[in-house]
Image: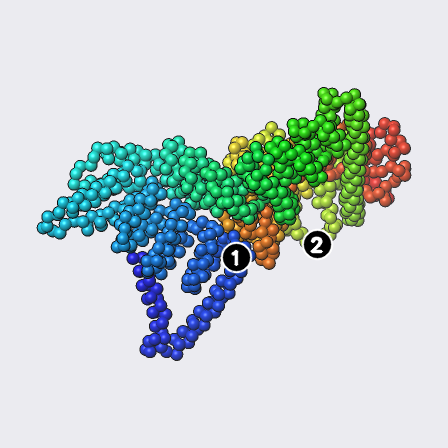
Amino acid sequence: MAATGAEAAAVAAEEEKRLPEDDPESGGDSEDEGDSDSSGDGEDEEKENEAEIQRLEEQLSINAFDYNCHLDLIKLLRQEGELVKLRRARQKMSELFPLTEEIWLDWLKDEIKMASESSEREKVYELFERAVKDYICPEIWLEYAQYSIGGIGQEGGIEKVRSIFERALTAVGLHVTKGAALWEAYREFENAILETTQPAPGSVPSPEQQQVLCSQLERIHTLFRRQLGIPLLDMEASYAEYEEWSEDPIPETTIKNYKKALQQLEKCKPYEEALLGAETPKLAEYQAYIDFEMKAGDPARIQLIYERALAENCLVPDLWARYNQYLDRQLKVKELVLSAHDRAVRNCPWTVGLWIRYLLAMERHRVDHGIISEMFEKALNAGFIQATDYVEIWQAYLDYLRRRVDFTQDSSKELEELRSAFARAVEYLKQEVEERFSESGDPSCTIMQNWARVEARLCNNMQKARELWDNIMTKGNAKYANMWLEYYNLERAHGDTQHCRKALHRAVQCTSDYPEHVCEVLLTLERIEGTLEDWDAAVQKTENRLARVNEQRAKAAEKEAALAKLEEEKAEQRKQARAEKKASKKAKKRIGDKRKADDDDEGEWGQDEEEQPSKRHKGDGDGELPEEDMEVETGLFGRSGSEKPDHSANLKEKASTSRKDTPKVFHDSSKDSVTVFVSNLSYTMADPEAKLKELFESCGEVAQIRPVFSNKGTFRGYCYIEFKEEKSALQALGLDRRVVEGRPMFVSPCVDKNKNPDFKVFRYSTTLEKHKLFISGLPFSCTKEELEEVCKAHGNVKDIRLVTNRAGKPKGLAYVEFENEAQASQAVLKMDGLTVKEHVIKVAISNPPLRKLPDKPEAGRAPQFAVPRQVYGARGKGRTQLSMMPRALQRQSNPVAKAENGMVQNSPATSSQPPEEPKKMSNADFAKMLLKK
């Protein structure tokens, strides 16, 4: 009926399209023009679609595994009505990928419309058989059963329909939410058959008719009883329907099974409700449901819930692996097991573990050798994302071939095939894999090692084993002690003492990582089996080798120490140069300001000393005028009495003065657990305390906010926020990287770095994350939403982080986190090399390189520049202790003496004498000195 209705709608639509041309009364000038315009637009659109179809076909000829390209091509061909090309495109896609329920239903409906003859109906049946094998789809089974009813008039039609219904009930009849529809459809079909067996009104049925009628009634009774014994939604309605339909009372056993099923349904309801309320892909909810069914232990229900989960999570390799493991260990049904493994590798072809399990399952169920070899070749073309994956699949196949060989025979076809496969594996890793990944994936030559073991232990062919090991050592493995010891153990077990001795002598000469261990093994061998001459030769060789090794290590240590010392000297020189340059600039600036102040008022310095109430006293009681106050009095560019005061500057000055007058609040390290450190804030933030309080109050009650201001009263971009409770501080860490006034705000734990110098907060993982992608080459204008639009076509995007600098400007890099490893792997294959806003991006699995930590100076090493240190206060060296006088104005009694930070240091000639206490000079002292010039 659905197909007939669709055809009628299509015919009606076609007639409406033709109406303006056929109806002579429907035309007018304006309508003719509009019709010509629409036809022109249609032609343009058709040409565009044809060009797009050609482009998609060319792209698929290059990469047949482009899933989205297949979907786009099928959609366009269906839109254009290209039925032959559409059928071919669907066929190609179904050979490579399992198709979703929607794709299958569209394909089946299109084929049903065109199937009129019996031969065409048989092709539709074949298509249905393929469709029900991909995933558990109650809708496809229901469509299959209803379509089969159309052939009921053919020979054996009724039995065929019943067979399809029974298979459908076996597959999805236990489905808690959708199984009832199949049971009801089956009963309706049997009720329709019952109507045809009823005798005509007023007639007496014959014994044969009576028997057929009773048999049909019993079928319907049986269907009701079977359904009521299964926990399905709306069971109460089915029970009431059975009571109404049945003329006899319901049997006690049926009622008992019905109540038991009701109890089971109550246990399942929480899991079904969780699935109903969860968002796709519902993986956690399905896993909880699977665990529940595993405890119950019903194989049919376990299989069904796994199939339901896989229908919505078909790209999750771990889920397929668990399902296949259950089938391998519990059910062990050949057809069921191999079908599940085949679907697993078709859904997740990039996962080598699924291919390995498939090969093992085929061997376990004694599948023909040719089919297993063909499946292995498919695995090689699956496009693994790591070089090591190819090593694993080759090793699995070689293990299979080794188990086929009868080693009691000197030669056999299987043995030659095994040797040929070993040689091909080595060549494949060297050519194909190394060309693609720039590495073979097998640096320690495990495949060649296994080949050597097979030749030595199973084939008694030590000559071939020695050739293989010689090849292994020439591939850069001769410097590793463990490789030599592996070869030695093989010689020890299957070779002779002479070759053992020869191998160890070579090992002593070549090993660079653990030569002591190899030397010890050589001495042990000679102690047990060697002659005196052998012992003397071994001792001499090991002593000479260890002496050279120790000498090399000492030279390397000296070179490293020299480099470290040079780096320290360079760092110290750079540090001193920066400090001198900074001090010189500030001193010149202060001198210029003071000279201008002297032109305005010669006695102002003395007045400043008397009028400043906020002056701080240090040292021996000499007053130091804070440089900030001095700048407020004299002005950076002098003062003119005729100029009008700047009100905005006055307000800013008052704000700065009020902040300077605020008493200093020192940090209490005992409250670090309830305090967070906030940095990278904008220096121009108007009222940091109010702004941050509003932002952080959502995390908990704020006890105190301590913004940090400079001596001029300007905000320095960081502050401390103290909470009442520790959990509030922990919650506040979640605001890290929140954008505040155009800059990312950094929120970190409050830690005393004097006590924990190595402490560094980095909230993101620095290890391999297979579910996360690293994208580079993005345009700086690319937004998070635009990137999400590109990525979500390949999976469920959990999070996107655009990498920015401290000012919040993008760097063209991003991290994209997917729901699982499978989606991320698929996205790498599809997105790498993609063009975004005329920028070609690079996409890879997130695996940040190891961070190089700065080398720490060796303990006990004296610093390069021994400078007498001044003991500063709790806050360290203050800015007011910088030298305020340029070097050119200094009166140097000693030409080599230098003034640094307001302190005169001893010259190198007198550095051996105890340094005298440096005389401290205040800003007023400097002013008096300048006035005397």
112 lies left or right of 858: left
Task: Count neighbours of disc 1 (C-alpha within 10 A) and say few if under 14, some if 14 to 19, many if 20 or more.
Answer: some
The residue at 61%/34% (across/down) is: 459
Secondary structure type for disc 2: loop
Q: Name the one closer to the observer, 437 or 911.
A: 437
Distance between the alpha carbons at the discs numbered 1 and 2: 78 Å
Above-or-below relation of 870 to 309: above
Q: Position of residue 805 (x, y in %)?
A: 63, 47
Q: Position of residue 817 (x, y in %)?
A: 54, 44
Which numbered disc covers residue 403?
none
Q: Looking at the image, is mark 1 or mark 2 earlier in the sequence?
A: 1
Amino acid type indicated by mark 2? Glu
Q: Name the one closer to the observer, 348 or 217.
A: 217
The residue at 72%/54% (across/down) is: 642
Q: Position of residue 317 (x, y in %)?
A: 49, 42
Q: Look at the image and tell me whether residue 583 can be seen.
A: no
Q: Quadrant of residue 151?
A: bottom left
Secondary structure type for disc 1: helix
Q: Look at the image and tell me whether residue 728 can be seen.
A: yes
Amino acid type indicated by mark 1? Leu
* Residue at the far front in the pictured view: 410
Residue position marked by numbered label 1 in the rendering: 60
Q: Name the one closer to the observer, 149 or 883.
A: 149
* Residue at the far left in the pictured view: 202
Question: Of tags 1 and 2, which is closer to the observer?
Answer: 1
Task: Count neighbours of disc 2 (C-alpha within 10 A) and say few if under 14, some if 14 to 19, many if 20 or more.
Answer: few
The residue at 27%/53% (across/down) is: 155
Does the residue at mark 1 contact the one at mark 2 (Cβ under 8 Å)?
no
State which quarter of the image contains the N terminus. Answer: bottom left
Q: Position of residue 746 (x, y in %)?
A: 60, 41
The residue at 48%/68% (across/down) is: 47
Which numbered disc covers residue 643?
2
